[in-house]
Amino acid sequence: MSEEHLSEGEIFADTKVLRSAYLPENLPHRKEQIASLKDMLSTTLKRKTPSNILIYGRVGTGKTATVKYVCKQLEETARTCNHPLIYINCELFYTQHRILSYLARFFNKRVPVFGWSTDVFYSELKERIDTGDKYVVVILDEMDKLVTKEDKTLYMLLKINNELNKARVSVIGISNNLSFSELLDQKVKSSFDVKEIVFPAYSAEELKDILTERARIAFNYSALDDGVIPLCVALAAKRNGDAKRALDLLLMSGEIAERNKSKKVREEHVRIASEKMDIGMVELVKTMPLQLKILLSSVLMLCREKSEGYPISGDVYSMYRRLCDHLGEKPLTQRRSADLIAELDSLGLINAVVVNRGRYGVTKEISLNVPEKLLQPFLFADYELKALSNFSVKENK
Ligand SMILES: Nc1ncnc2c1ncn2[C@@H]1O[C@H](COP(=O)(O)OP(=O)(O)OP(=O)(O)O)[C@@H](O)[C@H]1O
Ligand SMILES: [Mg+2]
């Protein structure tokens, strides 16, 4: 038995099963996506035409899990044929320079980490890849972390094949931005044979299957009250069917039950866990710079006012300027505010979904990801924002 097993108590049999690093043996409700991806990748590995794949789906829809699952299944084939599958998380490697240096080092450990220009890394990479009849698969997870910064990495990796004689590169790009596809140039998509796989959000029923299967291994028999999984599911389904949130909630509920010396996890533990998760998020506000707080206040006010639909980034910026005016603060430029919106999004406080509004162009629809009731007192208690508590959205227009 592993140490981890020995340390588990009455509630848990194996907590690591609920953690995000764990790759389940089974991925319910992703059969179709697994099959398409496996099919496309094995075609590539069998040295037929390499295809490029773009994977879209909202947060927690199993994109990373599915790609890792398929890679694991094909690992053996890839190794025996000497076709590397390279996984890169763009949240960590967020510039073209970093990705190129990582790739160059993948093929030649003697490449220095620093000091070379992007062009030098690129030539080194080309030279190293093109030594034989190789098919290199580069997986760019969280790819939107790059493209929003107008990064050209994706195009560069798609185009590299034009400059290779023997080897071939295939790209799998993963994005949690549903409109990502629309942002890519149609010409690029057709000339590079880019196929797409969509990961729809999980329904409550699907989330229930996922949680039940994980809970079976993670918890001791009968350690969960009947209402626990349905409540975790209901709370996560409200947040766009995010499986990660549902699993985090289940883990935290179990930890709370354990700390309270309860023999079972009960619904009350789930409620406490859910509130704790929200408070944890809201507490991020405390250490945020003032401009970010003002921007978040603008989102809060707009969401409170709007009875349907979501405010878009332009609305948020106008409101932000009004709030700055009210507070006597100098507003940032619209461009800089777009960076801050992306920052609030990656902190998980808001959801910013890119949409294409036809002739109005590409913009972002913004929604709050934490309950208004929890966020408002927290924000306005801040002495720098006190003056906002008497701000009226309508009167001051
Ligand atoms: N079909 C599934 N079966 C079992 N577990 C799943 C399934 N889908 C997702 N999960 C689990 O839910 C969590 C979130 O999944 P994953 O990280 O793959 O989502 P994602 O789509 O990559 O999200 P993000 O956009 O935030 O990167 C992981 O712990 C994963 O193991
Ligand atoms: Mg992911």
Image (cartoon, grey):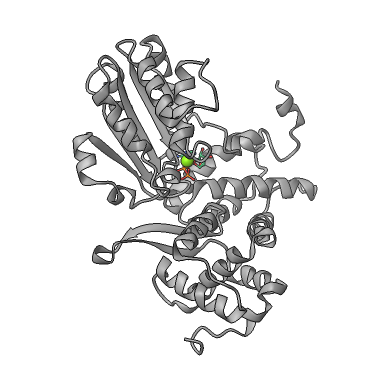
Picture layout, residue 387 above or below residue 174: below
Tell me if 177 is positioned left or right of 274 in this view: left
Q: Quadrant of the N terminus?
A: top right
Displayed quadrant of residue 33: top left
Q: Where is residue 280 in the image (x, y as percent from the top left)?
A: 67, 56
Tell me if 393 is positioned left or right of 251 in this view: left
Tell me if 151 is positioned left or right of 356 in this view: right
Which is more toward the observer, 275 or 377?
377
Picture layout, residue 18 above or below residue 180: above
* Number of numbered labels in the structure image: 0
Residue shown at 43%/18% (left/top)?
75
Q: Where is residue 242 in the image (x, y as percent from the top left)?
A: 49, 50
Tell me if 72 is positioned left or right of 199 in this view: right
Residue 37 in view in this figure:
no
Residue 184 in view in this figure:
yes
Q: Which residue lies furthest to the bottom in this view?
A: 395
Displayed quadrant of residue 326: bottom right
Which is more toward the observer, 82 or 244?
82
Residue shown at 29%/11% (left/top)?
133
Residue shown at 28%/66% (left/top)?
360
Picture layout, residue 311 above or below residue 280: below
Residue shown at 40%/29% (left/top)?
119
Q: Where is residue 299 in the image (x, y as percent from the top left)?
A: 51, 69
